[in-house]
Image: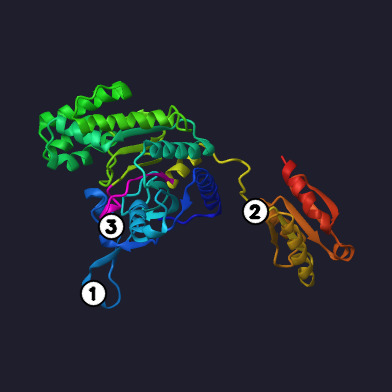
Amino acid sequence: MRDFLPEDVRHREYVIGIITRVYERYGFEPLETPAAENLETLMGKYGEEGNQLIFKILKRGEHEASGQADLALRYDLTVPLARVIAHHQAKLPRLFKRYQIQPVWRADRPARGRFREFYQCDVDALGSTSPVIEAEICGAVSEALTELGFADFTIRMNHRQLLTSMLAWCGVPEPLHSTALVAVDKLDKIGPEGVEGEMQARGVDAQAAHAVLQEFARLREAGFDAAIPFDATGQEAFKNLGAIASLAQNTPAANRIRFDPSLARGLSYYTGAIMEINVPDLAGSLGGGGRYDNLVGMFLGQSIPACGFSLGLERILVVMGERNMFPPSLATTPADVMVAVFDAKDTPHALRVAQMLRASGLRVMVYPDPDKIGKQIKYADTQGIPFVAILGGDEIANGTVTVKHLAAQTQTIYDQAAAGAAILEGLTHRG
């Protein structure tokens, strides 16, 4: 959980602004939910490891001494969305497309790009089982990353039903599927031998564990042309992946999707296609998601098809910072111009001129103290403010203002009404 200084906040707002605009281009509407949820709402939705990472909130007031928890901080934005759908179903359209950009909390061990408080940038569609949903979601997140300047990302895709069928075909009994998938989800971190060993430690037969890793290797090499010897459910799942990949060729996700049979995604609520976005220089992912057709039913009592994707803001910022991807034009100063005054009695004039300049579209700071003019200019220079508007007795009497361009070491006198346009012109052409 971190503090964000002005430059950090500007970078965050820049990224959030682009992601928001792209999501809205695809017809998604904004939604917000509270930071805290009932503990029972969150428990049991994220798998065994997820349950351990939930930040629990102890009971308060007269119940404080019990040491029990009844609330928890949001672990993700998907489960709260499912609760919202169940609670407000009558107010929402049958096909509901929403985006949500808010912080979530996990009691995790901090690492590069991994924090205990972090923002997720979610986009979800509820009410349809069509593969068009997955294709458009892949298109939306691809367009967002492309506009941010990413060119080397890949969307890894798999299907939970395909995974289930493959585990069964390889000899992993159904009661061990969930625990086996926890191990499979660590393939990128601990490698094939590590996964095989962990599967055995979790009770999977050594021969079955070895067969799973062999099947991963075969399917990964064959890609979407792979032969699927599993049951009908697995074959249908693979057909669904092919349909999504084909439709996605008509979106900004064209040529981004790769079939990865080992992709598991640890969250237990996924029921269909699952996706993850990776870049070469980040061990984890920039985001992930998938179809979760049964989650809303846990709250509503009836199934509503749903699919979503979450971009991880913090990891995007880490990679963009390391690659120097933020545009040079991104504001890095508190103001475009600072208004300086010689005498405290002239402050009302300074405030009026500042408002005139703001009305021109400038960011304006008024220096509050009647310090020596050299000290005021030095302050503007150290803050990176490019222009200083100086108001002395002559300027006030004549309705003018002296504008000093610090980098060029020039100064020009303008009518107060014309100063804003002149400074804007100078900002446009300063080099």
| Amino acid residing under circle 3 | Phe
Closer to the eye: label 2 or 3:
3
- Viewer can see residue 405: no
Q: Is residue 17 positioned above or below 228 on the image?
A: below
Q: Is residue 118 magenta?
A: no
Secondary-structure class at tag 3: helix
| Amino acid residing under circle 1 | Ala
Residue 351: horizontal and vertical position, in percent?
74, 66
According to the picture, the residue beneath numbered tag 2 turns out to be 383
Query: Which of the marked residues, 2 or 3, is nearer the chain's N terminus?
Result: 3
Mark 2 neighbour density, 10 Å: few (under 14) some (14–19) many (20 or more)? few
Judged left or right of residue 66, residue 400 is right
The part of the chain drawn in magenta is: 294-312
- Viewer can see residue 306: yes
According to the picture, the residue beneath numbered tag 1 turns out to be 65
Q: Is residue 311 magenta?
A: yes
| Amino acid residing under circle 2 | Gln
Q: Is residue 38 positioned above or below 169 on the image?
A: below
For the residues labelled 1 and 3, say whether their Cβ atoms are less than 8 Å apart: no
